[in-house]
Image: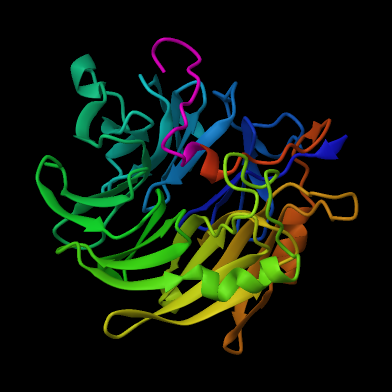
Amino acid sequence: MVRASITLVETSSQGHIALVFDANFHITDSTGKIVASTSDDVDASVAKIGGANKDRIITVAFSQDGSLFATCNNEKTVTIYNTADWTAVRSLIIAKRATAITFDPSGAYLLIADKFGEVHRTPTALSADEAASKPELLLGHVSIVCDVKMSYGSPSYVLTCDRDEKLRVSKYPNAYNIQSFGLGHTEFVTTIATAQFAPNNAVTGSGDGTLRLWDISSGQLVQTVDLQELLEPYYTDGRVLMGVSNFEDRNAATQRYGVLRVRSIEGQRMFVAAVERFPVVVVLSFGEGPALANVRVVDVARPVADVAVLGDRIVAAYAPPSGETDSDDLAVVLEPTNGDLATDVTLSAALNALSTQQIEAAAPAPSIYVWGNKMYMDPPKDDED
């Protein structure tokens, strides 16, 4: 038996860390102490979160003020929690399987992107008017929507990206008014990051191995950062391996640099990215121009499955161990120290001391290049998927 790895990590403005493992999650404070959990395997002093998921959690989000937390699982169940006492304030079944969720700036609505290319929004509080509580269609793509984010500042925009290489910027809440398209990626776009320090810009990551900086008002591509230039040595020296075990539907001799996640580090005016299969985080400063500068590759012990930001610290969740000699650490936390990034030993140790659940074996996460392939068809569970 082995300890289940963390599949998703999310942080809040109130200092909470959400650590997702399969169908359960822990909520810790900024010291790594569990304050609430859906798991039964925690101390009696820990708040037990009801309305537990019965299937794998695929996306989570905190509201901007940290007062709400939402999850969506593979059974298409969305649950919204009040973080003051971790009670479920709303639960609903959506029609299609979600790919990403985010709250609007007010926290009054949750936006839900799905595999059929649509984004709906639903009130975060129940209404006496049943019709007002139902999800309403905001916008649609002709391909899987991979991520959804809100801009900062005014006017407010909703940003979406899809499997057809596009970034779309729509006015909010009247998202039928398209502000711009960001065109330039050559593979599926997996992730979007917006930032308070750059309200007119966004950074996207893609299966084409690039990070791109955009002007969201015009859709203009401002800058492209090619990760191959930074990360190819990891293939050359064997720290990252090519082959069908890595990318099941791709050429075994192909190097890939797929971006899993991009986040903003507000206090440092930086962005951080996780790249599939690579034991690194990539950190980029945001400077005048605007421009992404001082790009750094920071080595960590194992490939990163997800990354989040807690204040000025980076929380990187590790992918499952690939060999018997690998440690079973869940995560590493990096903090700025003398102009560089160093391990926050105390918080890292606290997170790695947590129990998740015991499983027979750690299965490797499916590559993003599987569902990113335009020939890929996700086998439906039922006729409504």
Residue 77 is left or right of residue 326, and the answer is left
Q: x%, y% of residue 265? A: 45, 69
Q: Which residues are magenta?
A: 371-385
Q: Is residue 163 visible?
A: yes
Residue at the farthest top position: 383
Residue at coordinates 68% horizontally, 57% vertically from top-left? 303
Dominant SS in magenta: loop
Q: On screen, 93 above or below 209?
A: above
Residue 374 sits inside the magenta stretch: yes
Q: How many numbered discs sit on the rendered protein?
A: 0
Q: Is residue 153 above or below residue 156?
A: below
Residue 94 sits in quarter: top left
Q: Nearer the viewer, residue 136 or 380?
A: 380
For image coordinates 50% across by 15% down, the residue present is 381
- Quadrant containing the C terminus is top left
- Quadrant of residue 225 in the image? bottom left
User: Residue 372 location, x and y as percent?
Assistant: 46, 42
- In the rendered image, residue 85, in percent from the top left (x then y), is placed at 51, 38
Q: Nearer the viewer, residue 305 or 103?
A: 305
Q: Is residue 29 magenta?
A: no
Q: Is residue 105 visible?
A: no
Quadrant for the N terminus in the image: top right
